[in-house]
Image: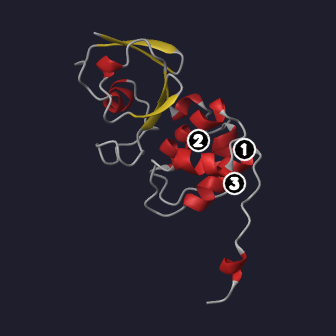
Amino acid sequence: MISLNVNGVQHTLDIDPSTPLLYALRNDLELHGAKFGCGMGQCGACTAIVDGEPTFSCVVPVGAIGTRPVRTLESLGTPDHPGPLQKAFVKHQAAQCGYCIAGMIMRAQSLLERNPHPTEEALRAHMEPNLCRCGTHMRILAAIREVAGLPEPQAHPASAQPL
C-alpha cells in the first residue's frame, strides 16, 4: 500500500511502489491535468509540484514520494473558477494544442510561489525544461509575466530592422 498526499488529501493506493507518479495521478486518482508526453522526463507535460519543486511525474516512482505533498493542476482552480495563472494562460491564448499547458502552469506556479517577481532571466531559466511543440513559448512567457507583474522585454533595435 502506498500513501500519497495529493492536493491536500491523503490517499492510500494499492499499487506497486515502482509505479510512476503520473500513472497513480491519472489512473488511480483520476486527476488528468498532468499528461503523458515522452515518458522520459524530457518534455514536462507531466509536471506536478512535489514538496514545492516542479517534478517530472513520469519518471518518479510513487514509492519515492514518501510524505512529501504532491500538487497537480487541479489544485489551482476549476473551469468555473480558474486560478490566476490559468486565467492568464487563457487571456494570452498560450495554448495551441494545449498538451503542454498543465505542465507549464505547474512549473510556473512553483517559481511564483518561491519568487513572486522573478527577473526575466530567472523566468526563462526556470521554464526552459518544459517544451511546447506548437511553439507558443512567447505567449506562455507573457502569461507568466502578467501574473508576476513583470514588464514585457524590450525588443533589440537590430531586431526591428527590416530584413
Disc 3 target residue: 91
**Distance Cα–Cα, label 1 vs label 2:** 10 Å
Which quadrant of the rendered structure holds the N terminus?
Answer: top left
Q: Which comes sooner in the sequence, label 1 or label 3?
A: 3
Q: Which percent across, then down, holds residue 143? A: 66, 51
Kindly indicate whether the residue at mark 2 contacts the one at mark 3 (C-beta within 8 angstroms).
no
**Distance Cα–Cα, label 3 vs label 2:** 16 Å
Q: Which percent across, then down, holds residue 124? A: 58, 51
Q: Residues within 10 Å of mark 1 (few under 14, many from 20)?
A: some
Q: Which residue reaches farthest bottom?
A: 163
Front one among 27 and 65: 65
Please name the amino acid that badge 2 sits on.
Ala
Please name the amino acid that badge 3 sits on.
Lys
Please name the amino acid that badge 1 sits on.
Val
Disc 2 target residue: 108
Compared with 151, 55 (above or below) is: above
Q: How many marks?
A: 3
Q: Which comes sooner in the sequence, label 3 or label 2?
A: 3
Residue 121 is left or right of residue 25, and the answer is right
Q: Residue at x 65, y 36 (%)?
A: 112
